[in-house]
Amino acid sequence: MRHVEHVMGTVFSFDVRHEPSGELRAALAAAVGLVHRVDEVFSTYRADSPVSRLGRGEITLAECPDEVAEVLALCEEAAAVSSGYFTGAPGGRLDPSGMVKGWAVERASAVLRAAGATRHCVNGGGDVRVSGEPEPGRPWRVGVAHPCRPGELVTVVSGRDLAVATSGTAERGPHIVNPRTDAPATGLASVTVVAETLTRADAMATAAFAMGEAACGWAERQTGLEAFAVTASGAMWWTAGFPRYGLVGAAQPSKPML
């Protein structure tokens, strides 16, 4: 079963590698509904969303849905791990968007697994959570776009039960702010993080991108996390464990594969 949904200002795709059944169709519908609810609660573009109202001081955290406190706590954890390079309040304005998308994909994936769909891929705007394998004996393969060469891949991540998140300038230009300078981070063109959950991978990719050159040493010290980056000059670096998952070097496939 495959489904594409436009939500949260991007495209979510669901690829479930099981024979369709009523239960799985219901689970897929529930996963899609969950992502829409996350958008309703956390969108900073909706003036009536709980997060927007909380940011303006119109309501308290206790008056928000429980998910808001959960996500803000995760933002605080990410800020501590990244020495403040991740923040849920860029520029002093409440905006946990750097956490929300990965967290939403992870929750949607959990809904599918709970219904018995152990072989699936959920892609939220290029950030991917894979479960199991697409076919027995074959891992999922996630292509990572080259930030400097449109239409090309810079690496391909391969594996089972993992998450892949990329932050960069290719799609939206310099939009991630270094919280220490309040200026757009420009040291990297893109950074891809591989971790067990997309909640962590997405937040840490954002933090690593904000760090710029310092991200290489920081990523190497993190347990359960591997990274691959392209610098603003086009050079590449990767953590010691990244080759377990991804191709490195100049020769890369020309299109993404799942």
Image (spheres, rainbow, N blue to C red):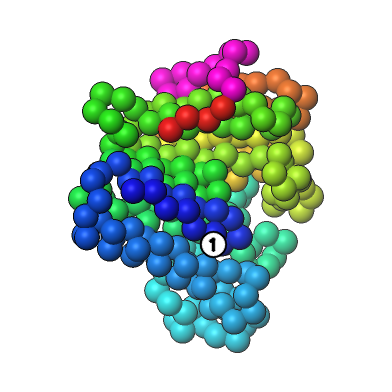
Residue 153, picture quadrant: top right
Query: Which residue in the structure is indicated by mark 1?
Result: 7
Q: Can you give x and y, in whole percent of width and height, for residue 215 in the image?
A: 61, 33
Instruction: Work out whether residue 133 or residue 45 is closer to the camera in this orientation and state it.
Output: 133
Count all numbered tags in the image, as a single digit.
Answer: 1
* Start-end of magenta stretch: 243-254
Q: Can you give x and y, in whole percent of width and height, for residue 83 in the image?
A: 58, 46
Check the image and report above or below for 68 versus 189.
Answer: below
| Dominant secondary structure of the residues highlighted in magenta in the image | loop
Check the image and report above or below for 20 versus 49.
Answer: above
Disc 1 marks a residue whose amino acid type is: Val
Q: Can you give x and y, in whole percent of width and height, for residue 39 in the image?
A: 52, 67
Residue 19 makes an appearance in the image: yes
Instruction: Work out whether residue 29 or residue 85 is closer to the camera in this orientation and state it.
Output: 29
Instruction: Work out whether residue 228 or residue 211 is closer to the camera in this orientation and state it.
Output: 228
Q: Can you give x and y, in whole percent of width and height, for residue 79 in the image?
A: 55, 52
Check the image and report above or below for 120 versus 104.
Answer: above
Residue 218 makes an appearance in the image: no
Residue at image x 28%, y 37%? 132
Residue at image x 46%, y 84%? 63
